[in-house]
Amino acid sequence: YRSLSANTTVALEIVRVIVLMLLVAHFIACFWYFLGSRPLNAGLDVADAWMAVSGTDSLDVGGRYLVAYHWAMANFVGNMNLECYTTAERLYSIFVLVFAFMVLAVVPPRITALMTRLSTAAVEKNALLTQLKLYLQDNGASAELAVRVERVAAGALRVHQQKPPESDVKLLRLLPEGTRSALRWEIFSPRLLIHPLFCRVFDRSPALGQQICHKAVSTTDLADGGVLFQAWFSSDVPVMYFLSSGKLSYTHATALDSEEVGPGSWLAEPLLWTSWIYRGDAIAQEDCSLLVVSAKSFQDEVLKSSLQKEVRRYADKFVNWLNGLEADVLTDVSTHTVNLVKQTVFLTNSAFRTLVFSEPEEHANFQTPSHTLTPDGGFEFAI
């Protein structure tokens, strides 16, 4: 399932309004048809009905309906091309004219506003892309790079229009913080439960889980061809990613082939616990949606809870396991990590039992990722 673009949504709304008008005209025409044929069915004087007077009764049923529908549509522009010959017909005609007046006061401005919105969106898009092209030209970007940047930028703009970020939804700012917290908990928590640690934390302390979702989790979208991160780069703002939809291509720095990363995977977990340099390139193969967990905010919320010691124990075990791996085995993707994790268990007293990892065949003195604790028991990123 993919969200519709803003332009498609506006176009569909215009179609919906037009179809609704045509449907209303159909019901008006049906009752007008009934009034024209009623005297014939009731055995009354045929001269009293518009259908007989206008000669429409000589047509087949389809022809009579088209004449009635034409009359109904004509009323919307104030052009009644059939006379009324009975009191019932005249009363109905007056009612339709009043109704048509009210419809015309609402529908055309609505369609105009939608068309203006569609035109404005197209103009803004072209202006942004033109501005980008001028910037690339003025700064001497190569033709190959310029084409790639423009393609990725156009995709990013399209994704932004399809899925506006939370910051663009103005009404959310008016909601009480408790309501926004509950909303984020319901939206984000199911996607985080794929990770055993988050699953256990949320299970043992829903309040902590809700605070994590509210304070530490956000969303980001990546267009086809967009780069999530690159090998040998570090992150200025340490975050962990959960892939919600779409596909990423991950290529390890020491590998020739790439692997496909799909929904249900997480990336860059070491950044939650220690300093880390990305070990490969993660590039979107199609439009992707990701959850972003801020390491600092996550740690701040954990340190306020009764589970901080257990989570710190997990962090120590995780970092010790990283330090026991060969340098070329370290990866940013969860797939490899999950294969090495045996189990995560809670004790009956609501405390974590330390994670049990399978031991690597050979331990290396790889100490680049290191984890330290501050004197007050908090987390600290070692450099």
Image (cartoon, rainbow, N blue to C red):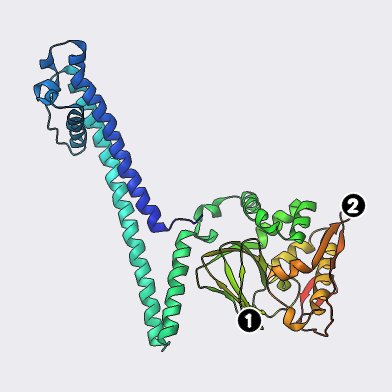
Report the side of 85 relative to 198 (left or right): left
Residue tagged by mark 2?
Answer: 348
Residue 234: percent from the left, percent from the top? 65, 80
Residue 373: in sight, yes or no? no
From this view, report whether residue 277 is shown above or below residue 4. below
Residue 303: percent from the left, percent from the top? 79, 64
Report the side of 93 relative to 157 (left or right): left
Residue 311 numbered tag: none
Which amino acid type is shown beneath numbered disc 1?
A: Ala
Residue 231 numbered tag: 1
From this view, report whether residue 229 is shown above or below residue 286. below
Secondary structure under tag 1 reads: loop
Secondary structure under tag 2 reads: loop
Report the side of 90 relative to 121 (left or right): left
Q: Where's the C terminus, which quadrant?
A: bottom right
Which residue occupies the foreground of this view, 163 or 212?
163
Residue 132: in sight, yes or no? yes
Indicate the quadrant where residue 254 lies: bottom right
